[in-house]
Image: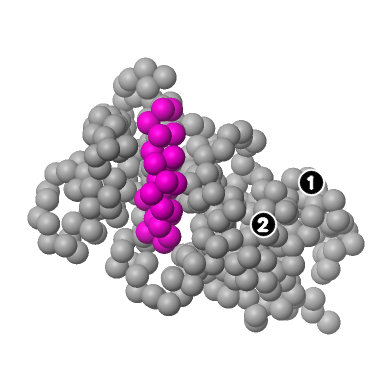
């Protein structure tokens, strides 16, 4: 008899946070969340005794720093709206990656469907410290719920708004940080904004041709100008210069301190832009984030 299941090994996330988001949002309740301390791979549902020893050892090691999200009712699991050939929990992880300005993913995805068993390996992220939340912790469940509801009710919006493919570049930027912090991360964040700004430029027939000005106009139209955002003019100039040096000259110019600061700023700002396309964070929250970005 077949023991069908899909099991995500989700890394670098607090169990209580994900469980609270699941309960508050009500959007992925078909997944059972299991603490690593409560999970025994060799006694788990559908355990494959004939799996190669290397894969067993890898899964056992990954389990130690993972939340296990498991479902045995594959037909009840929703499909991802953001990614092809993925489950709805992938969208939750992407939304949390935007909301907290850090990369959340599955270290591994274990799947058994009928006689087909396999393991998809993800990126084993490094330990990082810091709080860069765009969405406050108390609002995470509501943000995930509102975002998923909006996406579901507006099926064409993802492409019409430019969130797809911009979110792909954004994710690559976050992955770049986990492999090695570099100017590549800054360049990829810039391209994600450049992509979404370009679609905004075309959709509104603005006729702007210079890429930096396209991004500036998009940012201004989104309400990030003047006042607490006045520092952005200089910062955007540096982001664009770094992007050009990277992709056109293959050079890294600027002091380490400046590049580090600009990297943190583009990370938080791009996250904020994407978050507020799905849920307005309110003026006070925006001011708090603007101050943090300006003072890096």
In the image, farthest residue toward the front = 284
Quarter holding the C terminus is top left
Q: Nearer the viewer, residue 143 or 101?
A: 143
Pinpoint residue 153: horizontal percent, then vertical percent: 43, 77
* Label 2 close to label 1 by CB (< 8 Å): no
Relative placement, left or right, of 96 versus 44 is left
Relative placement, left or right, of 221 versus 95 is left
Of discs 2 and 1, which sits in the foreground? 2
Query: Does the rendering let one see residue 117?
Result: no
For label 1, the crowd category at 10 Å Cα-Cα, with few meaning under 14, some 14 to 19 and many 20 or more, is: some
- Closer to the chain start, of discs 2 and 1, is 2
Image-quadrant location for residue 277? bottom left
Q: Residue at x 64, y 36 (%)?
A: 127
- 123 up-or-down from 26: above or below: above
The residue segment tinted magenta is 271-296
Q: Nearer the viewer, residue 80 or 22?
A: 22
| Residue linked to disc 2 | 18
Name the dominant secondary structure of the magenta segment.
helix
- Please tell me whether mark 2 sits on a helix, a strand or a loop: helix
Query: Does the rendering let one see residue 163?
Result: yes
| Residue linked to disc 1 | 64
Pinpoint residue 57: horizontal percent, then vertical percent: 80, 48
């Amino acid at each position: 008899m077949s023991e069908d299941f899909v099991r995500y090994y989700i890394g670098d996330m607090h169990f209580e946070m994900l469980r609270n988001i699941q309960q508050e949002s009500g959007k992925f309740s078909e997944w059972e969340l299991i603490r690593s301390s409560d999970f025994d791979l060799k006694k788990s549902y559908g355990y494959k005794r004939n799996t190669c020893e290397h894969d067993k050892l890898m899964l056992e090691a990954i389990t130690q720093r993972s939340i296990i999200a498991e479902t045995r009712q594959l037909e009840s699991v929703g499909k991802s709206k953001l990614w092809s050939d993925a489950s709805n929990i992938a969208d939750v992880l992407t939304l949390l990656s935007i909301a907290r300005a850090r990369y959340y993913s599955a270290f591994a995805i274990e799947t058994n469907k009928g006689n087909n068993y396999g393991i998809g390996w993800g990126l084993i992220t490094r330990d990082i410290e810091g709080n860069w939340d765009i969405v406050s912790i108390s609002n995470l469940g509501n943000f995930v719920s509102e975002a998923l509801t909006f996406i579901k009710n507006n099926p064409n919006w993802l492409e019409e708004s430019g969130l797809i493919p911009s979110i792909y570049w954004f994710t690559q930027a976050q992955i770049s940080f986990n492999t090695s912090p570099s100017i590549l991360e800054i360049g990829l964040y810039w391209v994600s904004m450049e992509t979404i700004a370009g679609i905004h430029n075309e959709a509104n027939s603005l006729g702007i041709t210079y890429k930096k000005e396209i991004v500036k106009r998009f940012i201004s139209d989104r309400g990030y100008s003047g006042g607490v955002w006045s520092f952005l003019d200089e910062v955007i100039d540096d982001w664009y210069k770094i992007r050009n040096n990277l992709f056109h000259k293959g050079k890294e110019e600027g002091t380490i301190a400046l590049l580090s600061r600009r990297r943190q700023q583009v990370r938080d700002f791009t996250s904020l832009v994407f978050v507020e396309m799905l849920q307005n964070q309110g003026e006070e929250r925006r001011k708090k984030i603007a101050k943090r970005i300006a003072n890096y």
